[in-house]
Amino acid sequence: MTRFLSNNLELDHHDWHHLLRSLESANGHPVHDIRLSSEINNATRHKLKHLGLDPDDTTADELYHVLQSKFHQDDKTLSRKVQTIAMTHHSLSANVSDGIIHALKDLPDSKRCFAIKMPVIKNIIKQLPPKKTMKKLSYRSMASMIKHESAINLITAAWLIEDDNWRKKLIDSYKKLQPSDFENRNIIIQSVNYKRWHSIETDVVEKNKQNVLAFKELGAVIVLPLPKSAPDGAVTASLVIALEQLNNIRALSSFLKIAQVKAHYGQIVRDAVSSEPTLDTNISGPRLPWNIVQRYYANFEQHFNQAVFEPHLSIEDLAWHPIEESLCAIESSLDFWRNTSTLASSHRNQAVSFNIHDVALNACNHHPFQNRITKYFKKSLWQELMLRYFSHHHLEEVVSKELQPQLAEIGEY
C-alpha cells in the first residue's frame, strides 16, 4: 500500500491489511492503490493551484485556513441562493430553513424509498407513550396528542425530548416489524409544524448543535429552523448533512428491500437502523458495508445484472448522489468542491481534508488547525479504494449469497 493511503487510512488492524491483500490477489494484483494515490495527488495539486497556492510550498496550516476562507465565501453565496429559493416558494417572510427544504426537494436526485408506514409508527408510539413529550407540548392526554400531531411531528419531538431509554425501546420495537409494515414512497423532507413547540425549538437545535434530523427507517429528513446564534457556514453545513442523510436513507432502503427474503425480518430492521448493514465477502476479515454496494452500482449501472437483483431490487433503488454534485446543482458557483471527497494534502504527514463535510464542521465549530476533522475524507478514501478492488463479479457473488435464507449480520464501519 502507498504511504499516502497507509498514513491517511490508519489501517492498523491486521484484518484490513489481510482483506486488501486478498482482494489484490483475487484481482491479479492490479495496483489500484498506486493509481488512486497518483490520481489524488494530481487532483489535489490542481485544487491548490485553483486556490492560488504553490503545491510545493504550502504548509498544512496555511492550506487549512485558506480552505476555511474559501468555505465561508462560498457559504455566503449559497445562503443568498437558498434565501431566494425560500422567497420563491413562500414570501418575503420565509426563513432560510424553508429554502434548504425546497432546495433539497427541487434536486433531480432520486427521492424514492422503502420505509415504515406512518400508521405503523403511530401504533408503535401508542405502545411507547412519550410522556415527557406530551407534557412539553402541553397536551392533556396521550390520545389527544397522537390524534392531533402527524406521525413525523410525534417521532421528531419524542426523539429529541425523551431520554435514551425511550429511544432504545423505540428501536427495539422494530424487531416486531414485517415487510408488510413497509411501503414504497417518496422521501419526506420537511420542517416540523408544532403549534405548541415554538418555545423550545431554539433550545433543541442549540443543544444538539445541528438542525437536521433523519429517520432512515421512516425515509424522513427533518430540517429545523436555524437559530439566530447559528455560526457562519451553518447553511452549507445543514445542506451537507441533509444530503448525506438522503444517501443513507437510500442505502438503508435498498438493504431492507433485499432483506425481505430473510427470516427474522424485524431483527434485521432493528440492527440495520442501529448500525451500518454489512455483507459477508467470502474473504476472511472485515465485512463489506452495504453502502459500498450501493455506491458501486450507482457509479457502474452497466454492471447491474437484473437476474441477480430483481425482483428484489431495480437499478433505481441503488441510487447514490455525491454531496458536492448536489450542492453544485443548487448553486453552480460551488464547482470548486466537485470531486473533493477523497482529496487531502499531506505536508509532513499532516493531512488537511478537502472533503466539504470535514471543512464545514471545522468551520462551524471553529476548530483550530490542531483539532481539525478529517474523518469524512478518510471514510470516503476507504470506500473509493474498496470500489476499485471489488469487481462486479465478486459483488454479484456477495449479493447472491445475501439472497439466501441465512440471516444477514450487521456491523459498524
Image (tube, rainbow, N blue to C red):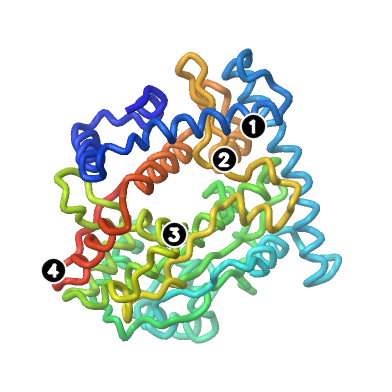
Between the C-alphas of marks 2 and 1, the distance is 9 Å
Between the C-alphas of marks 1 and 4, the distance is 47 Å
Question: Are dots 2 and 1 in contact, CB under 8 Å?
Answer: yes
The answer to which of marks 2 and 1 sits earlier in the sequence is 1
Question: Are dots 4 and 2 in contact, CB under 8 Å?
Answer: no
The answer to which of marks 4 and 3 sits earlier in the sequence is 3
Circle 3 or circle 1, nearest the eye:
3
- To which residue does mark 2 refer? 340
Q: Secondary structure at mark 4?
A: loop
Does 106 appear above or below 335? Answer: below
- To which residue does mark 4 refer? 406
Residue at position x 55%, y 43% in the image = 357
Q: Nearer the viewer, residue 161 or 13?
A: 13
Between the C-alphas of marks 4 and 3, the distance is 28 Å
Between the C-alphas of marks 3 and 1, the distance is 26 Å
Circle 1 or circle 4, nearest the eye:
1
Instruction: Give the amino acid type for the residue marked by disc 3 in the picture.
Output: Phe
- To which residue does mark 1 refer? 47
